[in-house]
Image: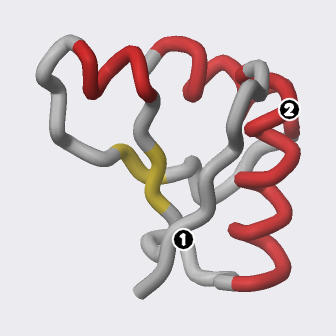
Amino acid sequence: MGSVTAVMATADEAAVLARWLRDSVAPAPDLVYFTSELALDRGDTNYQHVPPQGDREENARVLQDH
């Protein structure tokens, strides 16, 4: 288990990192999770899966919606 933090990143920039992690480092659909500082500030301690498929735009939408 490990973690990567994208500091001062937009959802679009974080989506590039998340997709690379999902596709290159941990290529299994249920291994890469994410959360955001905003969600944690609101008390949401649940992590969300990075979508198992999808391009940068789709992943950025998921990250932004969280």
Q: Is residue 15 above or below residue 2?
A: above
Q: Choose between 5 and 34: the one closer to the eye.
A: 5
- Answer yes or no: do the residues labelled 1 and 2 have beta carbons within 8 Å? no
59 sits left or right of 51 in the view = right
Secondary structure under the numbered disc 2 in the rendered image: helix
- How is the protein colored in the picture? secondary structure
- Residue drawn at x 45%, y 57% as measured from the top left: 33
Q: Residues within 10 Å of mark 1 (few under 14, many from 20)?
A: some
- Residue drawn at x 84%, y 80% as measured from the top left: 24
56 sits left or right of 34 in the view = right
26 sits left or right of 31 in the view = right
Kindly report the distance in space between the C-alpha atoms of the residues bearing marks 1 and 2: 20 Å
Residue extending farthest front: 7
Q: Is residue 40 above or below residue 56?
A: above
Query: Residue 61: which quarter of the image?
Result: top right
- Residue drawn at x 58%, y 15% as measured from the top left: 64
Quadrant (top left/top right/bottom left/bottom right) for the C terminus: top left
Locate residue 9, reporting x and y percent: 77, 27
Amino acid type of the residue tagged 2 in the rendering: Glu
Q: Which mark is residue 29?
A: 1
Amino acid type of the residue tagged 1 in the rendering: Pro
- Closer to the eye: label 1 or 2: 2
Whichever of labels 1 and 2 marks the residue nearer the N terminus, that label is 2
Residue placed under numbered mark 2 in the picture: 13
- Residue drawn at x 81%, y 52% as measured from the top left: 17
Q: Residues within 10 Å of mark 2 (few under 14, many from 20)?
A: few
Query: Residue 7: which quarter of the image?
Result: top right
Locate residue 32, reporting x and y percent: 52, 66
